Amino acid sequence: MATHEDDRAAYLAGEDRRSLGPEERAELDELRGLLGSTAAWAEPSADLEDRVVTAIAQEAAARPARPHLRRAPLLRPRWRWRWRWRLSRPAFAFGGLAAAAAVAVIAIVLATSNSSSPPQQLAMVVSGTPLAPDARGSATLTKTASGWRIELAASGLPRLAGGRYYEAWLKSRAGVLVPVGTFNDARKVTLWAGVPPPEYPSFTVTRQRAGASPASSGERVLTGAVRLPR
């Protein structure tokens, strides 16, 4: 005895099944039209996956995370399939459908990640010392799973080389210094801290020399304080 699913499969194959209602027939007609498209069976280009991933990555980079995005409602399938397609060709041979499916899946992942709470961020302004009176800049501190990422941008400091370099530090209220990275040019620097800036709110940059003591030289050229939320 034929089941309802058998009737649906038969209708897709071109048989007339009166047991199916008008709305269900319209849905199956739409699916049959998609399956009959030559684009659905075209062999994709070799760089399809790279192009899709690159396009989505560029789109994600251009869109900052939104703290109050509403979650999109879950889409309920309009029908259920209990029978399986048996094809001699691998799944990625569905050229047009594969590209559309890849974009849809990655877009859903991006929408889900964008709907999560934004990472904790802090900021600070840095200024020069008597050793570098013209130096000034700012920094953004972002909490990540790996630690705190500190993005520093400062001007008025010469580039150091030849065994000389800058080193950045965070200091606790008790006076404990923790190094957060070394660099040569302060115009655009990414530093990493393994300690929480709210507990180590003082920021300094010193001039150091390779081969000397790894401790702070005391030659501070930049200072700043992390702005803590009230």
Image (cartoon, rainbow, N blue to C red):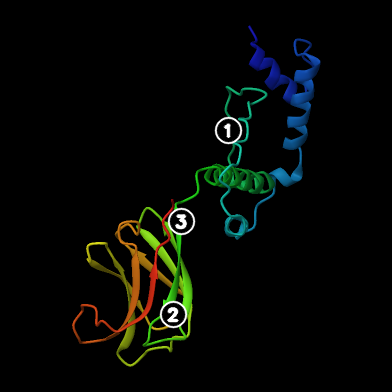
Q: Quadrant of the N terminus?
A: top right
Q: Amino acid at mark 1?
A: Arg
* Image location (x, y in percent) of residue 94: 64, 45
Looking at the rendered structure, the secondary structure element under dot 1 is loop
Q: Nearer the viewer, residue 66 or 5?
A: 66
Q: Is residue 136 above or below residue 109?
A: below
Q: Which residue is mark 3?
A: 121
Q: Earlier in the sequence, mark 1 or mark 3?
A: 1
Looking at the rendered structure, the secondary structure element under dot 2 is loop
Q: Which residue is mark 1?
A: 86
* Image location (x, y in percent) of residue 164: 31, 89
Looking at the rendered structure, the secondary structure element under dot 3 is strand
The image quadrant that residue 64 belongs to is bottom right
Q: Which residue is mark 2?
A: 186
Name of the residue lying farthest toward the bottom: 162
* Image location (x, y in percent) of residue 141: 43, 61
Q: Amino acid at mark 3?
A: Gln
* Image location (x, y in percent) of residue 74: 60, 30
Q: Nearer the viewer, residue 35 or 114?
A: 114
Name of the residue lying farthest toward the top: 1
Q: Is residue 13 visible?
A: no
The image quadrant that residue 172 belongs to is bottom left
